[in-house]
Amino acid sequence: MTTAYVFPGQGSQVVGMGGDWLGRSELVKRTFEEADDALGESLSRIIAEGPIEELTRTQNASPALVTVGVAYWRVLEAEGHAPDVVAGHSLGEYSALVCSGALEFGDAVRLTRLRGEAMQNAVPVGVGTMAAIIGIKDPAVIDELCAEAAQGQVLEPSAYNTMGQVVIAGHVEAVDRACDLAKSYRGIAKKLNVSAPFHCSLLAPAGVRLGEALATATISPLGVPYVPNVTAQWTPTSTADEIRERLVRQVSTPVMWQQSMATMVEQGVDTWLEVGAGRTLCGLIKRFERKATASGFESESWRS
C-alpha cells in the first residue's frame, strides 16, 4: 500500500471546520492557537463563528484551511500514521509542505495570509473571474476555446482538476464569451462565484509580492516526497530556491492537479487520504481513478 496525503484548497472552507476535534485533541487546539499567534489576531474565532462571508475572504480562507489541514496531519502523525508522498491543490500545497517538513507552520500561515491579500489586490474586483468547463477531456480543445474567446484579453486554463473538468480564468468579458462558446466545443460552462481570476497571468504581480516574502522564509529539506502544482512531478528532494520558485509560479499558472494524480498513480499510489475540511479532492480522485481508495480525515476511516 502506497499512501498519499492530499490537502484541499480554497472552496473547502465551512464555518466550524475542525470544531469536532477541538474539544478532544490538544494537538488541534494548540494548532489553532499557534495560527492566532502567527497572525496576531483570532483566526480561530473566524473559523468557529464566521460569518461565512468573512471566512471565505481569500486572506482568511487561505490560512484557515492551512490551519485545519496541519491540525489534522498532526493528529495522524501522533497516532503513528505517515504518508509516502504529499500534494496539495492550490493553497493546499502549503499544508503539504508543512507535512513534508519543508515549511514551518507559522511561516505557512503568514505566507498564505499575504498570498491571499496579494492575489485579491492584484486585479480589481469585477475585472476578472473564473468558470468551470465540464465535459471537454482534451486540453488542446480547452486551449482552442480560450484562444477563440480571448479576443485580445487574458483567458487561460487555471486548473486541470480531473478528466473533463478544467477551470479557466481571465477578464470577465473573455470568460463570458467562453461560456457562450462552450456548447459548440461540446462542453458545459459554469461561472464560479469568485472575487479574482486565480492562477492566470493577471495574478503575476501577486507572485512578485509573494516572492519577496518567501525570500525570508526558512525552507528546510523535504522529509517526504511531494508533487508540486506547477510541475506535477514526483519530487523527493528539492532546494529551498526551487520550492520558492514553484510557489511563486503557482500564483499565476495552472494547477496541474489531474497531471499530479497521474504522476502519483504511476508511482504506485493506491490509497489517498484527504487531510482537511470536506472531501472535494476525494471526488476528483475517484473520477480520475475509479479503483482508488480515497477517504477523508473526518470520516476517521484511517483509524482502521
Image: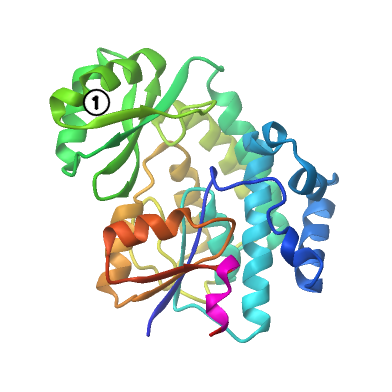
Decide which of 1, 204 is in the foreground and name it: 1
Quarter assignment of residue 145: top left
Residue 287 in the image: state x and y as whole percent.
30, 57
The residue lying at 49 percent from left, 76 percent from top is 224
Decide which of 22, 235 is in the foreground and name it: 22
* Range of residues picked out in magenta: 298-303
Q: Is residue 236 above or below residue 33?
A: below
The residue lying at 62 percent from left, 70 percent from top is 73
Residue 195 shown in magenta: no
Residue 301 shown in magenta: yes
Residue 36 in the image: state x and y as whole percent.
82, 52
Residue 245 in the image: state x and y as whole percent.
47, 50
Q: Is residue 231 left or right of residue 126?
A: left
Q: Magenta: predominant secondary structure element? A: helix
Visible residue check, residue 214: yes
Q: What element carries label 1?
A: helix
Q: In this view, does 223 lie above or below 87?
A: below
Count of residue discs: 1
Q: Is residue 115 left or right of residue 23?
A: left
Residue 12 in the image: state x and y as whole percent.
55, 48
Crowding near the residue tagged with mark 1, few <14, some 14–19, many ≥20 C-alpha atoms within 10 Å: many
Amino acid type for the residue under numbered disc 1: Cys
The residue lying at 25 percent from left, 71 percent from top is 266
Quarter assignment of residue 160: top left
Q: Is residue 203 left or right of residue 118?
A: left
Q: Is residue 212 above or below residue 129?
A: below
* Residue underneath mark 1: 146
Visible residue check, residue 217: no
Quarter assignment of residue 35: bottom right
- Name the colouring of the figure: rainbow
Q: In this view, does 27 lie above or below 202?
A: below
